[in-house]
Amino acid sequence: MTKPSTPALTWSLRGRRPADIPVTADGPALTREWAWGGSTGRGVRVCVVDSGVERDHPLVGRVDGSYVVRADGDGARVEPTESGDSCGHGTACAGIIRRTAPDCELHSVRVLGERFSGTGEVLLAGLRWAVEQRFDVINLSLSTTREQYTEVLRAIADQAYFGRSVIVASAHNTPVESYPWRFSSVISVGSHQEEDPELFLYNPRPPVEFFAPGQNIAVPWLGGSTIRTTGNSFATPYIAGLCALVLAKYPGLTPFQLKSMLYLSAANVHTSSDRGAR
């Protein structure tokens, strides 16, 4: 998660260019046209676990369901809510998903409060609920550095993986251990600085698996506004949107199959056969 003023990133392609990370893959060519050409994401259910989503923002449009995690002495629970976004972060992510997959179902679970505040208990409850609802794609532009939550998060990520819910998780913006993006059961995303808004790359040197646009990009924000900001948080929903496009065209793909399709269609991955125009 990154505030608008956040400085340079670490888990990103900053300082390198796409040509610096070429990848040669075996197998037939896989073009983007084959993978998601003609798809708009229709019928795919996407959930943004974040700070909420501002309803009626012109760059977000329809929000199909809004929920909030409330925690008290009896624990944390998820409830429907009419409230919007507490700090703008979730609206930014939702807007990128909507721009990428305009006809997907878009749902929101608020786990962050004002000034980007949140607790591990609330994050776990919101993510677990989203997995239990069997959303097709779950965008998580958040992570935690607290090791006591690691194994619970791993179990939730595995539950999603085997239940065919794809968690697309943002890498931390600094070189620290955080989760769940480091788990192999999720799709992890960092950002690049290239100007092409549709360029995404496979990283041959994980733990970050993919790089997508996320540096100095325009995103929707509170009050129907837009800002320019930087962060792996904002690369993540682009990949989540691509997942929605692919799943709308090929329903029933497993997370493994979906990740393989992203890998083979990344701009820096080349096969022995002619890949043609991407």
Image: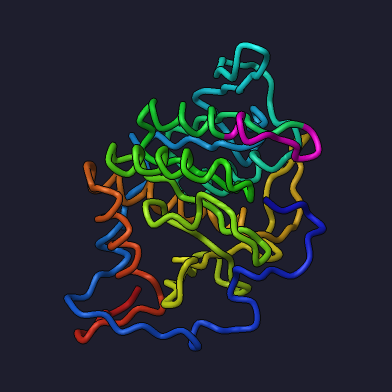
Residue situated in front as seen by the camera: 108 or 117: 117
| Main secondary structure along the magenta-highlighted residues | helix
Q: Nearer the viewer, residue 164 or 121?
A: 121
Within the magenta stretch, is there residue 151? no
Name the residue nearer the viewer: 263 or 218.
263
Instruction: Look at the image and name its color scheme.
Output: rainbow
Q: Residue at left 30%, top 50%?
A: 255
Image label count: 0
Compared with residue 251, is residue 218 higher up or lower down, i.e. above or below?
A: below
Compared to residue 243, the image places residue 223 above or below, namely above
Horizontal placement of 235 versus 114: left or right?
left
Tell me if residue 178 comes above or below residue 252 in the rendering: below
Q: Is residue 42 visible to the viewer in this orientation of the structure?
A: no
Residue at horizontal 69 percent and vertical 20 percent from the top: 83
Q: Position of residue 177 (x, y in %)?
A: 60, 59
Quadrant position of the C terminus in the picture: bottom left
In the displayed orientation, state which residue is furthest to the top.
74
In this rendering, position of residue 161 left or right of residue 71: left
- Left or right: residue 170 versus residue 262 is right
Q: Is residue 250 visible?
A: yes
Residue 254 position, x and y percent, is: 25, 48
Point out the stretch of residues depicted in magenta: 114-123
